[in-house]
Image: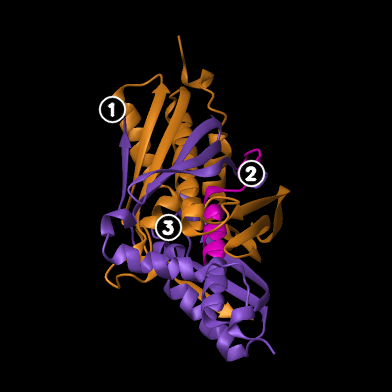
Chain colours: A orange, B purple
Amino acid sequence: MTTIDSIDNGVNVQALLDAREALKSAPEAAQFTWRSTTRWENGVHTTSTVKDFAGLGAEQSHKAEHEFVADHPEVFAAEDHGITPIEYLLVGLGSCLTAGVASVAQNRGIQLRSVEATVEGVHDIRGILGADSDVRNGYNGIKVTFTIDADASKEDIEALVAQSQKRSAVFDALTNPTDVTVEVA
Amino acid sequence: MTTIDSIDNGVNVQALLDAREALKSAPEAAQFTWRSTTRWENGVHTTSTVKDFAGLGAEQSHKAEHEFVADHPEVFAAEDHGITPIEYLLVGLGSCLTAGVASVAQNRGIQLRSVEATVEGVHDIRGILGADSDVRNGYNGIKVTFTIDADASKEDIEALVAQSQKRSAVFDALTNPTDVTVEVA
């Protein structure tokens, strides 16, 4: 028999619930600043580096520095050294919702066996090319399709996904506007 | 003397201007679908894979498949195998605006020597933790700071950056809402 105690999706839910309580009375510690630095290589080829961030009232750091190459495909007359900038949004969305599914499943005592999310973004490139000023630059829409194998009914799995969506940082960042300021130093 | 013909930022502007003209009369070819697939590893650790996309009326593919690890830092009681999902948005934004600066500079005959963009996103994590329902899950704001060395006045450099912003797919995707549908297969 599977009991809630024996469920292990690898998420330390107790630590997250403790953090929630602790931050209720220490809102300043909940203010995080995430950072990335992009260096131009050549053409539309760039390298972005992520390592340090701030949070819990202090400077923090990932265990390692991570580098991300972006470029454009050859059909855009570029060299395709890496994925396009807008594809990074799909990576962020899929990984955020999937991490959320694992966390919610742990909290609800549902053992996951496998989770896969396919993310598709529809993009009319006439916007970025300036071919039609009525076409937006970004995605016209994004669709995420989950395939989940878990000890749970289809209904419970759908509820997991709905709750993950409700608490997802990236889902919110894409479906609602964020103020972005761009300056030259 | 530097002439426009001798400017080389590595961007084939003529190909992009030709594509703009060609797509004006072939809007169906301008419909792209970008894709990413996220696989759950354990806990909040995931691996996302990007290779194929559709556009110009056909299936297309990047030269290589690219994998992206996401996780959460140890201060989130996770194992920090990679950057967080929401940091991928900063990578996308920095790389998109920087590629735009290179393209616009090429079109305006401005030789770039170096471009660096520092991207910072302020995030109150009480939202995702459910500690305060008035706090949003995503970023409260994002700031991009460019440092650019180029054969141009400060004013011309600021105009470059402004034009890049105006045509940026990721800037639009973050500052304006996008419809995101999430389903279970």
Count residues near mark 1 (Cα–Cα under 10 Å), then give few for <14, some for 14-19, many for 20+. Answer: few
Q: Amino acid at mark 2?
A: Gly
Marks 2 and 3, how far apart at CA:
20 Å
Residue most extreme to the front: B5
The lab-note entry on whether marks 2 and 1 share a chain reads no
Determine the residue positioned at 46% across, 37% down: B37
To which chain does the residue with label 1 belong? A
Kindly identify which chain the residue marked by label 3 belongs to.
Answer: A
- Element under disc 2: loop
Residue A153 sits inside the magenta stretch: no
Mark 3, secondary structure of its residue: helix
Of badges 1 and 3, nearer the viewer stands 3
Q: Quadrant of residue A157?
A: top left
Q: Which residue is mark 2?
A: B82
Three-letter amino acid code of the residue under disc 1:
Glu
Residue A101 vertical placement versus B107 (above, below): above
In the figure, is residue B111 to the left or right of A165?
right
The disc at residue A173 is 3
Q: Position of residue B64 (x, y in %)?
A: 57, 41
Confirm whether circles 1 and 3 share one chain.
yes
The residue positioned 31% from the left and 37% from the top of the image is B183
Magenta-drawn segment? B76-96
Identify the disc placed on residue A155. 1
**Residue A148 spot, x, y in % from top left:** 40, 27
